[in-house]
Image (cartoon, grey):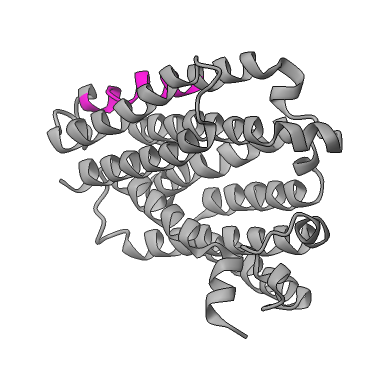
Amino acid sequence: MKIKAVYELMRLDHGFMFMIAVFIGALVTGQDVIDNLISIVFASLTALFLQAGAFALNDYMDLDIDRINNRMDRPLVRGELKPETALLIFFITFPLGIIFSFLVNEICFLVALVTGFLAILYDVKIKKLKYLGNLYIAYTTSIPFIFGSFAVSSKVCLPAMILALIAFLSNLGREIMKDLLDIEGDRARGVRSLPLLLGEKSARLAVAILYLSAVSLSPLPFFLRGTVYCMDYFYLCTIILADLIFLHISLGLTKRTSDLQRYRKLSLIGMMVGLSAFLLGAIA
């Protein structure tokens, strides 16, 4: 078994970002990190293992269509891992994620159960309805902030909710942008994506509105009195950089000849900058 292939199957780069988001969600509550270190570690491991299991199951379920589409970025398609290995990884990592959530607290356990159920439902059914799949993907990028907050507190603090909403809006926009890139293939396969339901022009407008909504929310933590981001210029300067990226993309989406592939890559950079802002502001 090749370690690199397992890494790719489990999408551990995504997992590490989810762990960072959980850590940020815990930090912004203002609770003492040292006193809650075990809970934060267990919550982070929950996010890591659940997403790893979900991706392993995803690649197992999509193997036939990935072969047709020649997805050589997938280790199962390359033949470096057997389908049974992906299924085994799912049956190991998914229960581990649920177990770690149980060790945190009851609220985190319930959130993990719901998220785990949605992950399986997505891999088996929801994915075929792209507009619902988009909502699920956006949910998975936002829930780690809420989950991290619940790991150290019985209530979700306002900064965590704002960060989660920003993540949800920006990632929903990015998923719709991907559907715009896939519009011809989806039309040929009869897949019901948002661009096919609303039309390409309306879908572009929807992406721009989602990005602009995320941008409009991003300064709010800076002005929240009594929170970790209040008057934090590390946060403000970094989040402005992310905002400029998304403003540039939003403006470009109004042009029919815009390079969607480049904008989607640029949106990932914007999200990484935004995540850095969340982290820098929380620890500065």
Residue 155 seen from this side: no
Q: Position of residue 189 (x, y in %)?
A: 85, 38
Give the image quarter of residue 198.
Answer: top right
Give the quarter of the figure containing the N terminus.
bottom right
Highlighted range, magenta: 210-222
Q: Is residue 211 magenta?
A: yes
Q: Is residue 63 above or below residue 147?
A: below
Say if 20 sits above or below 255 in the image. below
- The picture quadrant where one finds residue 225 is top left
Give the number of marks. Answer: 0
In-image side of 20 versus 91 (left or right): left
The foreground one among 6 and 135 is 6
- Left or right placement of residue 78 versus residue 218 in this view: right
Who's the residue at 39% across and 64% down the image?
41
**Res 194 seen here:** yes
* Residue shown at 57% from the left, 38% from the top: 139
Q: Nearer the viewer, residue 59 or 47?
A: 59
Across and down, in percent, residue 273 comes to: 31, 41
For the stretch drawn in magenta, the main secondary structure is: helix
In the image as oriented, which residue stretches furthest toward the bottom? 1
Spot occupied by residue 174 in the image (x, y as percentages of width and height): 53, 34
Q: Position of residue 107 (x, y in %)?
A: 54, 48
